[in-house]
Amino acid sequence: MLNVGLTGGIGSGKSTVDRLFSAKGAYIIDFDALTCLVEEPNRQAWKEIVAHFGKKILNADDTINRRKLAEIVFHDRKELNKLNSIVHPIVINEWQRRIADIRKEKEDAIIISDIPLLIEIGLHNRVDLRILVYISSKKQIKRIIKRNGYSIKKAERRLNSQMPIDDKIPYADFVINNEGHLKETRKTVDEIWGKLLEKEKSIRKGYINDGGRK
């Protein structure tokens, strides 16, 4: 099995890359989806979030209003850190459970874990390889404005809440430049997929030759 961490920045197009890898046969674990899961009403993370931020961040059906919560945390670094301290440990536990389940299902699986804060929270040290989906910060701003309808100031604030994408390059084993046409991104994914298959085989071969020990 090969566990790959995929990251990028807001607006970089990670979801598109996820779909391309999924079509190749990769198992995708989306941290945003895991976050939504653990924040469902009356789950542990939901209870802790509501206890700290209050019921003002809830919708009528008790689900978390993510826009309201975002308006709080992206204006206050301490509040953002508090939210992360609540959610991240629970999401990571769920991530590890998903990995274990996939391993049981398919020993030679290639897992792509889409983790926006892969580097920021130190999970880059808990994966076998790291992929960065890259677009320049200027293009990130343009995509955020177009996709979310944000003002330039709001888009910049969201971007500044994350680690600069150029600072992530040294951590990456592979960089997918996603600024061009989809066919260019697909070609890069095809090339990387071949290398991931080779890496998974070498890891599994080493594991077998070492008597099942890592």
Image (cartoon, rainbow, N blue to C red):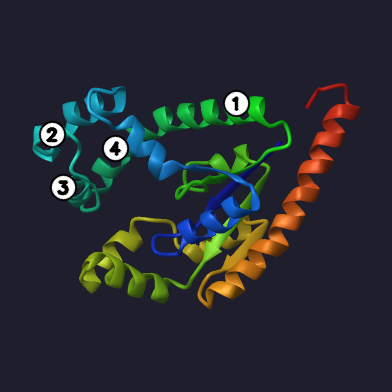
Look at the numbered disc 3 and give the secondary structure of its residue.
helix
- Left or right placement of residue 145 versus residue 16 in this view: left
The mark nearer the N terminus, 4 or 3, is: 3
- Left or right placement of residue 79 versus residue 175 in this view: left
Nearer to the camera, 138 or 32 = 32
The mark nearer the N terminus, 2 or 3, is: 2
Nearer to the camera, 207 or 194 = 194
Q: Are marks 2 and 3 in contact (CB under 8 Å)?
A: no
According to the image, label 4 marks what residue?
Answer: 83
According to the image, label 1 marks what residue?
Answer: 100
Q: Is residue 168 above or below residue 178?
A: above
Q: Is residue 25 above or below residue 11?
A: above
Q: CA distance from mark 4 to mark 2?
A: 21 Å
The image position of residue 14, as x and y in percent, is: 48, 58
Residue type (three-letter) at the residue carrying disc 3: Lys
Q: Are marks 4 and 1 in contact (CB under 8 Å)?
A: no
The image position of residue 11, as x and y in percent, is: 39, 64
Residue type (three-letter) at the residue carrying disc 2: Asp
Label placed on residue 68: 3
The mark nearer the N terminus, 4 or 1, is: 4
According to the image, label 2 marks what residue?
Answer: 61
